[in-house]
Amino acid sequence: MFKYKYDQLFKPTIEALKQLGGSGSINEIEEKVIEILNLNDDEINDIHRDNTTKLSYRLAWARTYLKKFGLIENSSRGIWALTEKGLKATIDENEIKKYVVEKSKENQEKSATISENDINDELSEFKWKEELLEIVKSIDPQAFERLCQRLLRELGFINVEVTQYSNDGGIDGKGVIRLGGVMSFHVVFQAKRYRDTVSASVVRDFRGAMIGRADKGLIITTGSFTREAKKEAQRDGAPPIDLIDGNDFAEKLKDLKLGVETKLVEEVKIEKEWFENF
């Protein structure tokens, strides 16, 4: 079981970014935190909800607090980096929590805690993704395969076919991806409408089915992959397999506007000082 609270991840997150050269993706930060804390497989794979581990969820809370305190920042491409303050600061968990809670009270004037529904928090990402994935998990299995087929077509695949019912050794479909209009790669995929984690054995079995049939393999799931599954997918000496977990799946549906609409909310702010100085 994962025992670390979000505030206990402040220091490991900062240390992870320092070891990564000052910046890193969410996955890179998570892997580095795993090394720093020497986490075991049970701690790493402990699930918070269907497609999110407790480690990932609490690291997101930690990043939110550290960002509000001014120690880290993130770009639109999802890369997190230490600020100048973050490079020099000595981490005091209680000071950070107190500062963020007080700022939250000033801004919201109604709560002493940070709300998950705060649209400025990274954690709001979890809410819409969970809602979307619950809908996807409830659709008919064949409809899910057609959705994966549509997703791959929108991502640039051609000749995408669903083959599950041909008893093709765990392969649910196939397609071709063309790079630069010149090089083509034959890809087979497996679509798993999971609520749980996909294990390394699933990746190994899929690789056995794809060898000799395609250049690359892809596993799509509405759940998550264990760390062992991720390692197995990129194991040295074996054909690499790309993985799309529930969070990635939701992001791609959003980016491609497949059943997901993004709305910009207008915020009206009254400048009281303007009238006082009129």
Image (cartoon, grey):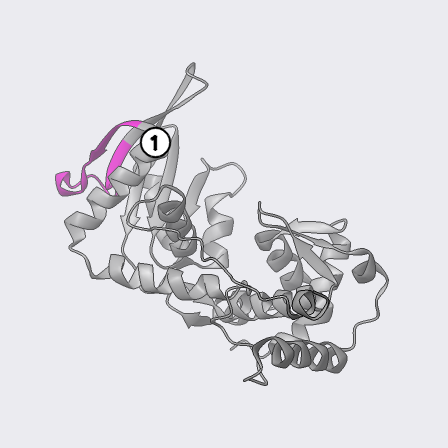
Q: Is residue 181 above or below residue 63?
A: above
Q: Position of residue 227 (x, y in %)?
A: 50, 58
Give me the residue at 25% from left, 61% from top: 135
Q: Position of residue 54 (x, y in %)?
A: 50, 71
Is residue 38 in view from this perspective? no
Kind of element beneath mark 1: strand
Outermost top residue: 182
Residue nearest the observer in this picture, 95 or 214: 95
In which quarter of the view is residue 277 placed? bottom right
Q: Residue at x 27, y 56 (%)?
A: 193
Q: Which quadrant holds residue 187?
A: top left
- Mark 1 — residue? 187
* Quarter in which the C terminus is drawn: bottom right
Span colored in magenta: 158-174
Amino acid type at circle 1 is Val
Residue 167, image x, y percentages: 16, 41
The correct choice, above or below, for 169 with respect to 176 in the image is below
User: Quick check: 86 left or right of 197?
Assistant: right
Mark 1 crowdedness (10 Å alpha carbons): few <14, some 14-19, many ≥20: many
- Name the residue: 61% across, 67% down: 64
Left or right of 146 on screen, residue 110: right
